[in-house]
Image: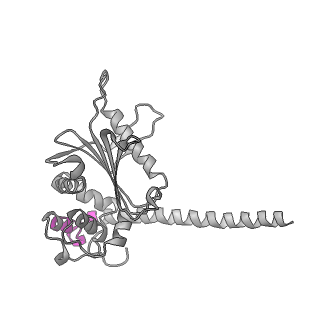
């Protein structure tokens, strides 16, 4: 944070919600969803933001908070998550998010279980262990049977691993708009306006939204706080890992000494 900031990191909580999670920028989210999920959903014309806090039906149930939760003109639900820090059980978290959205949509007395189609879109700025043996960075997951036939189309989970993407795509893609979106999000802090893809005028708006000079003093402070909170968490994780390795080494040496004796 000591270096001069030109563009903010759109992958931090503040940046991501500034771009995709505000009423005045709903058309930006629509453009993004239409690009990323068009093969699964079709065209989205409008969206409505939903409450991102879903409280359990029982006091013992965990309180869940989504990054972005919305519905489209067809009644489909979208859960959109941006995760920067690595979580070994992130897939379990996503499944629980979907389950809570389903339980909250069911009406008392509904014997047909008419819950909406649910699309879970997850951008990961780490390499997920679920996909560690593959170079692919884009994954669509559906419920299928042993013959690879769709069992249900009610749930679609999409994972995008941004670090794998960045390792493979080193410059602005010329034609692939899906990759252009990912490149813009991953490289916003270093990209120049004249190198923005021209295929979508939304990109210029996103660039302006990330321009630090356009921020009010309150917005600048909120951004700095968002980045520092993330860095604090990363430092704590690194410290815990280092302490664990040190303790494990000591225990290993002691055990080896005992076995040697």
Whether residue 55 can be seen here: yes
Whether residue 225 can be seen here: no
Q: Position of residue 102 (x, y in %)?
A: 34, 36
Tell me the quadrant of the picture where the C terminus can be found.
bottom right
The reply to whether the magenta stretch includes residue 38 is: no
For this view, does 72 lie left or right of residue 83?
Answer: left
Q: Is 102 placed above or below 119 here?
A: above
Task: Work out whether residue 193 or residue 172 is closer to the camera in this orientation and state it.
Answer: 172
Kindly give the residue lying farthest to the front in the view shown. 147
Q: Where is residue 97 in the image (x, y as percent from the top left)?
A: 38, 43
The reply to whether the magenta stretch includes residue 205 is: yes
Tell me the quadrant of the picture where the N terminus can be found.
bottom left
Task: Work out whether residue 217 or residue 60 is closer to the camera in this orientation and state it.
Answer: 60
Q: Where is residue 166 in the image (x, y as percent from the top left)?
A: 34, 70
For this view, does 22 lie left or right of residue 100?
Answer: left
Q: In which quarter of the image is residue 243?
A: bottom right
Q: Is 97 placed above or below 203 here?
A: above
Over which residues does the magenta segment extend? 204-219
Q: Is 121 placed above or below 171 here?
A: above
Q: Quadrant of residue 181?
A: bottom left
Residue found at x 69% / y 67%: 249
Residue found at x 57% / y 62%: 240
The image shows a total of numbered marks equal to 0
Residue found at x 72% / y 65%: 252
């Amino acid at each position: 944070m000591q270096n001069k900031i030109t563009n903010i990191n759109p992958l931090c909580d503040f940046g991501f919600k500034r771009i995709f999670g505000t009423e005045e920028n709903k058309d930006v989210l629509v453009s993004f969803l239409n690009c990323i999920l068009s093969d699964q959903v079709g065209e989205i014309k409008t969206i409505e933001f939903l409450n991102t806090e879903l409280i359990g039906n029982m006091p013992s149930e965990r309180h869940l908070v989504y990054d972005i939760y919305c519905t489209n003109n067809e009644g489909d639900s979208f859960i959109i998550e941006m995760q920067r820090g690595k979580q070994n059980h992130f897939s379990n978290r996503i499944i629980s998010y979907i389950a809570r959205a389903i339980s909250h949509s069911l009406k008392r007395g509904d014997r047909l279980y008419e819950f909406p189609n649910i699309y879970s879109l997850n951008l990961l700025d780490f390499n997920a262990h679920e996909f560690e043996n593959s170079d692919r960075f884009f994954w669509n997951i559906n419920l299928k049977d042993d013959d690879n036939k769709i069992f249900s189309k009610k749930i679609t989970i999409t994972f995008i691993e941004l670090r794998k993407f960045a390792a493979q795509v080193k410059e602005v893609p010329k034609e692939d708009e899906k990759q252009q979106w990912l490149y813009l999000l991953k490289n916003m802090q270093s990209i120049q306006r004249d190198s923005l893809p021209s295929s979508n005028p939304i990109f210029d708006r996103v660039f302006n939204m990330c321009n630090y000079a356009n921020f009010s003093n309150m917005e600048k402070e909120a951004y700095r706080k968002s980045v520092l909170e993330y860095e604090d968490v990363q430092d704590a994780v690194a410290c815990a890992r280092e302490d664990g390795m040190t303790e494990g080494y000591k225990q290993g040496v002691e055990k080896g000494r005992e076995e040697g004796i």
